[in-house]
Structure formats: structure tokens, C-alpha cells
Amino acid sequence: MALMNDSFFSPTENDFAQDRQEGLRPSVVACVINKKGQVLLGFKNKFGIWEMPQGRIEEGENLISALEREIAEELGKSFLESVFVPASPLLAVEQVIFPGSGIEDKKLSVGGKKIQMKGKKYYFCAVGQIQEREPEEIEYNEFGWFSAKKAFETIEQIPQKGKKRILKKAVEILEKNGFIK
């Protein structure tokens, strides 16, 4: 996972279109950090795992609009009002390639053509909670604020190797850069 900074890389809609051409679904991941230096994780009963709020970047969206839309959709509009989204929120980029040739029923739409989805490209973005407010249980069954140690222990329980690997790296970057303790 590559650590980003403002001068290194600021993805554009063209970058996301290129991801799709390569069979990778671009996805934004919200690394929501509170004032206590904890990261927000949500639990989905459907998959039985804790994860950071995330979702696909739609065609025509930029990184910030996708990030704000996903936060509103997954955590609630009032929660979105409680966070600060910086002008350059990108922390890191990582990808997961599915085993085999991809998931048979998953196709990406690229300029009217359908392309076989072979993996996902995750754009990890830092978001700071500036007003205490709990997220709404829209897509997640429960939420928790996690220290780095607790996040690592929780992520270790994830059965999917790719998801576990990228979430561990995300928490490492958050901890290394002093966002979480």
C-alpha cells in the first residue's frame, strides 16, 4: 500500500476510468478518526466482519464527492455534517485481485461497454470527526471506535485474506502518522 501526500497523487475521474478499464472497481474507504485518536469501524452481520465504511466510486464522481456520498449513505447525513473532509484526503491506495479470472457475475460499465471485474482498487481517505455524533445503523448493524491495538486485534479475525491485508495496512498508516493511538 503506497502512502500518499498532496504532491504525489491526487486521483481524477480519468484515473478511476482507467481502473475500470483494467477490470478494477474503484472504491473509496472512509478512515474516520475521532478526537480521541480512534478509528471508526462498522460491523455487518451479513458478512460477519468489522470494516471501514466504503463503497464504489461512480462514473463521473471525484474522490471527495464519492467519499461524502458514501459517508451519507452508510453512516447518515447528520453524521456527514459531524466530520471534516480535507481538500486532499487521500492516505493510500491498494488493490485486491480476486482469485481466478474474477467474479463471473460482476461486470464494470466503462463507456457503455461491460468489462469483467477482476478486483477492487481502494482509495483510503482520512476524515476527522469534529463534532461528537454516532453514525446511523443504515448499512452496518453496529459501530465502534477503535484504538490501533483494538483495530489490529479485530481485523485479525477477518477471514478474507485480501480485506484483512488492506485493512491492517490502513491501520498501520493511520497509527504511523499519528492519526490513531
Image (cartoon, rainbow, N blue to C red):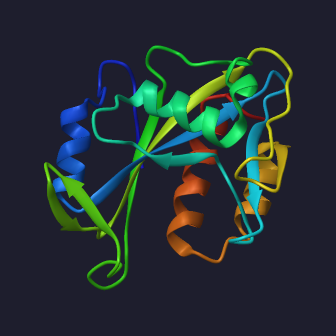
| 163 shown above or below 54 | below
Q: Seen in the image, is 19 located left or right of residue 31?
A: left
Instruction: Count the numbered circles shown.
Output: 0
Residue lying at the far bottom of the rendered structure: 100
Observer-nearest of 33 and 112: 112
| 10 shown above or below 107 | above
Query: For residue 58, what is the image quadrant?
Result: top left
Query: For residue 85, what is the image quadrant?
Result: top right
Q: Position of residue 179 (x, y in %)?
A: 67, 28
Q: What residue is drawn where x is 80% and y is 39%?
A: 136
Q: What residue is drawn where x is 86% and y is 21%?
A: 132
Q: Position of residue 112 (x, y in %)?
A: 14, 53
Observer-nearest of 109 and 7: 109
Observer-nearest of 165 and 70: 70
Q: What residue is drawn where x is 55% and y is 52%?
A: 169
Q: What residue is drawn where x is 70% and y is 62%?
A: 155
| 56 shown above or below 82 | below
Observer-nearest of 35 and 64: 64
Q: Position of residue 26 (x, y in %)?
A: 35, 49
The quarter of the image holding the C terminus is: top right
Q: Position of residue 68 (x, y in %)?
A: 54, 28
Query: For residue 64, what is the image quadrant?
Result: top left
| 22 shown above or below 65 | below
